[in-house]
Image (tube, rainbow, N blue to C red):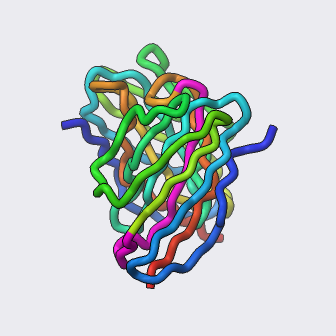
């Protein structure tokens, strides 16, 4: 079956702009989580959506937001981009989400560079 | 505070040799522990997931162990190959809301 699909794969934005990243989870998965990964910080949890509802949120400023659609596809948006937002943004999907004992599948990520 | 500490941060091994990565956690109550492999610039790929009652789980040349009493886990790579060069991330579930806590990862470089 198809894996987690993230688009775009690479993008370059200018400070102050906004960006929207998209994630299509594995068919049947209702939980979608987003992570930011930078070389110095490792994987940092952004938020989790389950059946269109945000269930968990990490410690990121309000510039980071997300949503999930009825078909479980999810988008995350970052407004007023800063240089420090340059990172690999990973989407993960699973059946039940959180830390329940089901496998969590990651997408290949979206590389965002802010200049 | 729930934490996951991995060691070493990085290591270099020769092709064909074995190595062991360590993961210590303070997450409580414990739900499960996962190991992921992440190639540079790619998304993490699940290797194993273990619950409280499981001591060992294998996935090909990868063997994970779990000691829930001491809150330690290890990932053993047998007969390493060049394709094993990657970061290995330990992730522990538990605590309030059964959230995931990520370790900082161990970067492995296999040299011919």
Q: Is residue B37 visible?
A: no
Q: Is residue A89 magenta?
A: yes
> Residue at image x 42%, y 39%?
B91
Query: Which residue appears at 50% of the width and 64% of the height?
Result: A88
Q: Quadrant of the C terminus of chain B?
A: bottom right
Q: Nearer the viewer, residue B23 or B33?
A: B33
* Residue drawn at 53 percent across, 33 percent down: A52
The relative height of residue A6 versus residue B30 in the rendered view (above or below) is below
Q: Is residue B86 above or below residue A33?
A: below
A93 on left or right of A36: right
Magenta stretch: give its range: A80-96
- The count of marks equals 0
Q: From the top left corner, tell me how far across and down residue B39 is, in percent.
A: 60, 60
Q: Is residue B68 magenta?
A: no
The percent coordinates of residue B27 (x first, y second) are 28, 31
Residue at position x 24%, y 33% in the image? B26
Q: Residue lying furthest top in this view?
A: B53
Query: Which of the two residues, B4 or A87, is positioned nearer the viewer here?
Result: A87
Residue nearest the viewer, comparing A38 with A91: A91
Q: Quadrant of residue A61?
A: bottom left
Residue B42 in view here: yes
Q: Answer left or right for A40 relative to A2.
A: left
Viewer-closest of A71 and B54: A71
State the image coordinates of residue A53 (x, y, percent, origin top left).
47, 32
In the picture, which quadrant includes the N terminus of chain B?
top left
């Amino acid at each position: 079956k198809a894996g987690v699909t993230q688009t775009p794969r690479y993008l370059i934005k200018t400070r102050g702009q906004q960006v929207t990243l998209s994630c299509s989870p594995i068919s049947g998965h209702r939980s979608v989580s987003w992570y930011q990964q930078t070389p110095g910080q490792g994987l940092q949890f952004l938020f989790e959506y389950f059946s269109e509802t945000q269930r968990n949120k990490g410690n990121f400023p309000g510039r980071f937001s997300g949503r999930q659609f009825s078909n479980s596809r999810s988008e995350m948006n970052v407004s007023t981009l800063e240089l420090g937002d340059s990172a690999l943004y990973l989407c993960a999907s699973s059946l039940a989400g959180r830390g329940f004992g089901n496998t969590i599948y990651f997408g290949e990520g979206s590389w965002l560079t802010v200049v | 505070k729930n934490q996951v500490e991995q060691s070493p941060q990085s290591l270099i091994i020769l092709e064909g040799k074995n190595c062991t990565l360590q993961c210590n956690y303070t997450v409580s109550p414990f739900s499960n522990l996962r190991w992921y492999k992440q190639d540079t610039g790619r998304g993490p790929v699940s290797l194993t997931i273990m619950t409280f009652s499981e001591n060992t789980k294998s996935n090909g040349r990868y063997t994970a162990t779990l000691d829930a009493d001491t809150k330690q886990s290890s990932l053993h790579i047998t007969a390493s190959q060049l394709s094993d060069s990657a970061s290995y991330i330990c992730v522990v579930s538990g605590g309030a809301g059964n959230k995931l806590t990520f370790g900082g990862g161990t970067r492995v470089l296999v040299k011919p």
